[in-house]
Amino acid sequence: MSKLTKEQIDQFFISQFQSFESKLNGESKKPLHQVRRNAFEAFRENGLPVAKNEEYKYTNIAKAFGRNLNVEALAEEASEFTTDDIQKHFIPDLEAINLVFVNGQFNESLSHLQNLPEGLHIQSIKTAQNDFSDDFAQHFHQHSIEGADSFSSLNTAFTNSGAFIKIAKSAIIEKTIACYYFSDAERKDVISQPRNLVIAEQNSQANMLETYVTLGNNSSFTNAATEIVIKDDAIFDYYKLQNESAKAIHVGATLVHQLGKSVFNSSTFSFSGAVIRNNLSIAVHKEHSETNMSGLYFINNSTHVDNHTVVDHKVANCESNETYKGVLDGKSKGVFNGKIFVRQPAQKTNAFQSNRNILLSDEAEMDTKPQLEIWADDVKCSHGCTVGQLDKDQLFYLRARGLDEKTAKSMLLNAFASDVVNKIKIEALKTLVESKITERL
Amino acid sequence: MSKDDQILEQFASKEYEHGWTVDIEADSAPPGLNEDIVRFISAKKEEPEWLLEWRLKAYRNWRKMTEPNWANVHYPKPQFEDIIYYSAPKKKKTANSLDEVDPELLKTFERLGISLTEQKRLTGVAVDAVMDSVSVGTTFKKQLLEQGIIFCSFSEAVKEHPELVKKYIGSVVPSNDNFYAALNSAVFSDGSFCYIPKGVRCPVELSTYFRINAANTGQFERTLIVAEEDSYVSYLEGCTAPQRDENQLHAAVVEIYAAKNAEVKYSTVQNWYPGDKQGKGGIYNFVTKRGICAGDYAKISWTQVETGSAVTWKYPSCILKGDYSQGEFYSVAVTNNFQQADTGTKMIHIGKNTKSRIVSKGVSGGRSQNSYRGLVEIHPRATNSRNFSQCDSLLMGDQCGAHTFPYIEVKNKSSQIEHEATTSKIGEDQIFYCTQRGIDEESAVALIVNGYCKEVLNKLPMEFAVEAQKLLALTLEGSVG
């Protein structure tokens, strides 16, 4: 299979879009399609980012794509899945409303859409764009969020049938809204571009989990985007779990538009995959909001994990906290870039960021770039990052007390990861993450 | 208007104190740059063939390059065709004593407070003064020569020690390294050359004062410092420039080569004209500074106090090639009005057990933008390496900005890297504490900022520390955050 250049990949997506457009029976007049077209033009202007692009300096998605995907023989139709096929991939013991996506398409029949708790509305974007046209006009791809890039434009251009999730005013949804994204790479390579819009109305509370599964041994490329609008006084918890096949290339954008006195908590866990790039972008638009981000990447082999986060403080009196931790073994590579923007009106902002990494092997690599850009003076901002190894004294302490090296190491690594793991409020997910870490050790 | 605003206003309206122009007839090349100008400069300086070739090669590379635009600074691009690339004071003959130096020049130095005679008699600092590109006075040369130390202007070194210059020029900063380094390589006018032989500890602090004169002259200095095995040298560089309207370009190159066990300490105080309070005028300072710790146990230490220039773009770097070698970077960057600074360092760890330390303190006021941009790179071979970085920013006033862009790349498991950064303003409680004890607000700010920068100022040689403190006090006069 020949390797594709960036230009060829751009061209591939352009022709894909044209054929996609021609199949949109009667939809081309709708406002959503105009959004698609604009996004497509934005994508066409630059195409996929190249290594020269500062944001993709350490992660060359186009190269990984060109090397691994055979675009001439892509899976057109997904296999017929039964509930049994997918059930085994669900997180055990999780009290959840399960939403199932297959190759980027929201699959209503496999999802649990009956008996939804009061105040929660879930619908396919296909129909929701008509039923909730106001929400779409206001929010769908309408917020320019720092950190959104060519990939999110590409995703928007191919918006077809994602999920529209709306949490009503003052509703409290206890169960987790769990989104499972399946890429069917059993027979052929596959491209998935799931797209969701989540609106948390005033004073509501909800938590959401996204996890990605590639089935089969062929390559997959996922370019996901989830837009989340959090209105005044709402609390929203967001989890992302990545435990992909070694041939999965993942680019995922989470674009958050946060309004006043709201709280947004995000936790990202990455354990495996070929190339993973997470773009978490949060724009804080109203005062007294709180944003917490945490992440753990615990990787080995040749997994490449890149976490890019942006918090854009546009208004005063907000707070943000960020803690990302990484353990890298084998030939894995970790990339972290955390941006904190504090705009001129955003006085009295408190922003804290930390990125800590442990390298376990000489072939592992960590590139980190914590970045503060501040235009307001009455702020408290700090960041710190470290790259190192397990403390020899600590190891010695444990070994002197009769623990073998392996146990001692795993104890220390568990402790290292614990402050990120302990932020998980869903017990079933916490158990799963803990077992993943133990499995690794 | 609140008190803060008033004081800020005072601070903002402060004019540059060191600005004036001295009339010295210059022997200039026509403006613009082409191969003939490069040849003209080379011929004027009576350079050997190999150096002309080297310049031409750099010039051809430069033609192919484009200006970098990744830095966090915005300014009208210099018109390279309008710059006069060569200008020398007319009396070109080498002065053996200060009596032979143009009295006008001496007056200039006196106004700057660096009378050569005074320096010579009182401080024991040998001064190689660069006035518009040609060295006019070199003191203490004889004493230094007795120890085998060569400290002279670059053009003199080309004539007298061509073998040394040929060996080391471009060895740390290749002529095609970047846009401005290539430009400098093609048209560098003069600069300083310093060679410390094996086992010699330079007894005095070597110092060069740069001064830009003659309107429309780009200043292209080139400094080369070579420290042989087991040697030590402390080198000082400092500048002030006359006030003028048009932007001036300064693209210097500094190369440091440290052999086994050698130690080089390089200190800079930079106070070029930053432009007036509307942001008009001011110097563009695009400098390439790099040192290589070529041998084991070598050490290079950069210390800088940056208060001037309209636009600064400067990253003194260390390549830590030898095992156990060390690099240090201490910086204070103060920006005010419309100044923009994008400065930082690069620490490239190649050798085993190498260490580096970065301490950067930024202070921004007015409408200025101050950025720290740094790279710490640990190669797979550089086992057990250690880096510690700290960059703090202090904001005074709500129209300025402070930005941090640290890049950290680690490629082995035994190295330890730490980075921390903070951004804040001067705490009201700190000011209150001082005023409560009878210190007025202005002195309190000076006190706090001096304390904040102390870690860096302490690294400066004594003679320089005094000057730097004066400069900081002067820049901070009337500023309250």
Image (cartoon, rainbow, N blue to C red):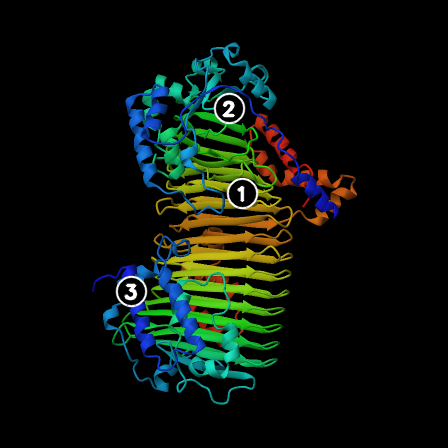
Residue position marked by numbered label 2 in the rendering: B207
Q: Where does residue B385 sit, x and y in percent of width and height?
A: 42, 44
Tag 1 subunit: B
- Label 1 is placed on what type of residue? Gln
Nearest to the observer: residue A215 or residue A42: A42
Q: Do discs 3 and 1 belong to a common subunit?
A: no
Q: How many numbered marks does the figure carry?
A: 3
- The quarter of the picture where residue A44 lies is bottom left
Residues behind callouts 2 and 1 on a single chain: yes
Q: Position of residue B178 (x, y in %)?
A: 38, 39
- Camera-near label (2 vs 1) is 1
Disc 2 or 1, which lies upstream in sequence?
Answer: 2
Name the image quarter holding residue A8: bottom left
User: Relative to residue A314, is residue B51 drawn left or right?
Assistant: left
Q: Are marks 3 and 1 in contact (CB under 8 Å)?
A: no
Under tag 1, what secondary structure?
A: strand
Q: Please tell me in which quadrant of the rendered image residue A262 appears.
A: bottom right
Compared with B405, A298 (above or below) is below
Of tags 2 and 3, the one toward the viewer is: 3
Of residue A426 and residue B461, the one placed in the foreground of this image is B461
Mark identifier at residue A11? 3
Discs 2, 1 touching: Cβ within 8 Å? no
Tag 2–tag 3 contact (CB < 8 Å): no
For label 1, the residue is B340
